[in-house]
Amino acid sequence: MLGDNNKDYQMSLGWSLNHQDICSPGTYSHEGAGHCGLYIDPKERLIYVFFVPSQTGWVAEAVINPRAIVWSSLV
């Protein structure tokens, strides 16, 4: 399971609660198989959903980089 090797990986009912990156405090998310995800940022009143049509494994260019572009536009 994702996060099994990390003692501080916070999950609740399948939602990731701890974002130590560009997202606002209080943001929660869920990433699923097939390069899809949902991020909800209550502070910015933002919902970010992504679907990446790809047969390859998880890659930052498809998931993290677009998310960084969206949140950096809020600054």
Image (cartoon, rainbow, N blue to C red):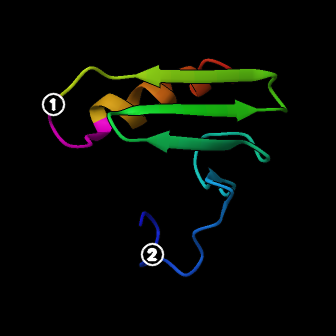
- Label of residue 55 in the image: 1
Of helix, strand and loop, which one carries label 1? loop
Q: Of the residues shown, which amino acid type is indicated by label 1?
A: Gln
Of helix, strand and loop, which one carries label 2? loop
Res 9 → quadrant: bottom right
**What residue does disc 2 label?**
4
Label 1, label 2: how far apart the Cα atoms are: 24 Å
The spot of residue 46 in percent (x, y) is: 73, 21
Name the residue: 47% across, 22% down.
50
Specify the farthest residue to the front. 13
* Residues drawn in magenta: 55-60
Q: Residues within 10 Å of mark 2 (few under 14, many from 20)?
A: few
Name the residue: 75% across, 33% down.
41
- Left or right, residue 60 beside residue 17: left
**The N terminus, quarter of image:** bottom left
The spot of residue 14 in percent (x, y) is: 61, 53
